Amino acid sequence: MAKNPRRSTPLSTFLSVFSLILAVVALSLTTNVSAAPTPSPRPARWEIDFKVKHELRLVSLSGEYYWFMTYLVTNNTGEDQTFVPSATLYTDAGEIVDDGDVDLDVIDEMLELLSMPLLEAKNDILGTILQGKENAREGLLIWKAGSLDIDHVTVFVSGLSSETQVALNSFTGEETVVRKAKAREYEVPGDPLANVRRPGLFTGEHWIMR
């Protein structure tokens, strides 16, 4: 009686197993991406209304170049709130600049240039913001400009919302608290020096957690 030949694994079975592995890996990657913190679809406990008055633009002060914008904040939350504004400027050159990190003389020069009696610098506007339109505050955001060879700028404004979340750092495995911030996008094509004091092209805004 002849011996049964050794059974070989059909190619179709191998391909099925391989496809299953790929599906599991893809699902894992998708889960990791979707796990990134996103703002809640429901409004936070409180959010301060934010409106830009001067869109982002470049200005020359004391022989240096700075980005600046001005805004109006109104507290319509139903109770007095503590307002601690913070704004970070990102450029497509890889620069990350925090607002207000400039000399006081430059800030005073900027305030005088704009000639807005109610406009306040960062250190003056932070604190309690009372309720109602009659108590709205005008604020200045200013950043020292680095490379001007850029085409896109994003400004992240924090301190407008009470929403926070706990996120896991995928690199360190540590938990960190992230806060809801408003991201405003600008295009600044061409030579920025030829467009000093002209606003960048505002292309939209959205909420993020950062």
Image (cartoon, rainbow, N blue to C red):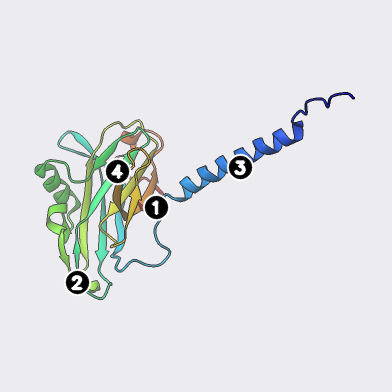
Q: Do the CB atoms of the residues marked 2 and 4 lie less than 8 Å apart?
A: no
In the rendered structure, which amino acid carries the disc numbered 2?
A: Asp
As drawn, the residue found furthest toward the front would be 1
Q: Nearer the viewer, residue 80 or 22?
A: 22
Which residue is the site of mark 2? 80
Considering only order in the chain, which callout, 3 or 4, is on the residue closer to the N terminus? 3
Asked which quadrant contains residue 22, the reply is top right
In the rendered structure, which amino acid carries the disc numbered 4?
A: Leu
Quarter containing the N terminus: top right
- Mark 2, Cα crowd under 10 Å, few <14 / some 14-19 / many 20+, is few
Whole-number angstrom distance, CA of label 1 to CA of label 3: 24 Å
What residue is rendered at 16% in x and 53% in y?
122
- Mark 1, Cα crowd under 10 Å, few <14 / some 14-19 / many 20+, is some
What residue is rendered at 9% in x and 43% in y?
105
Q: Secondary structure at mark 1?
A: loop
Which residue is the site of mark 4? 89
